[in-house]
Amino acid sequence: MADPVIAQPAPFPVDVEAGKKYFWCACGKSANQPFCDGSHRDTEFVPRQFEATASRTMYFCGCKRSAKAPLCDGTHNSL
C-alpha cells in the first residue's frame, strides 16, 4: 500500500456538531482538508467516516498516519 500525501504536519481543529457525519480524507489529496472531496478516486485510499457524539472541537489528523484516524494521535511529531 502506498503512503498517503501529508496534507499538513499538524492536526486540523474542527468544530463538529453532535449527530453530524464527517468523511475524513485518507489519501491527503483533497483540496477540502481534512475532509474528502473525491480526490482519492485514483488511489487505493477510501475516506473514513466520523460521527460526532457531541458538539465540540475535534482534532483531525493532517499527516494521514495516525493510528487513531481520523483523529490525531500525535504521530506527526515523529515525522
Image (spheres, helix red, strand yellow):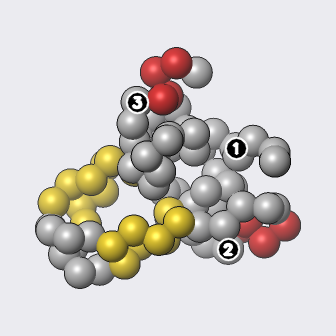
From this viewpoint, is residue 3 visible? yes
Q: Position of residue 69 (x, y in %)?
A: 47, 51
Q: Which residue was labeled with disc 1?
A: 5
Secondary structure, mark 2, is: loop
Secondary structure, mark 3, is: loop
Q: Position of residue 77 (x, y in %)?
A: 46, 21
Residue in the picture at 52% in, 18% down: 78
Check the image and report above or below for 4 versus 46.
above
Is residue 18 shown left or right of residue 6? left
**What whole-number distance in Å separates the C-alpha atoms at marks 3 and 2?**
26 Å
Residue in the picture at 58% in, 21% down: 79
Disc nearer the start of the sequence (2/1): 1
**What whole-number distance in Å separates the C-alpha atoms at marks 2 and 1?**
14 Å
Residue in the picture at 48% in, 29% down: 75
Kindly identify the amino acid type of the residue bearing the numbered disc 3: Gly
Residue in the picture at 32% in, 47% down: 59
Check the image and report above or below for 59 versus 65.
below
The disc at residue 38 is 2
Which image quarter: residue 2? top right
Disc nearer the start of the sequence (3/2): 2
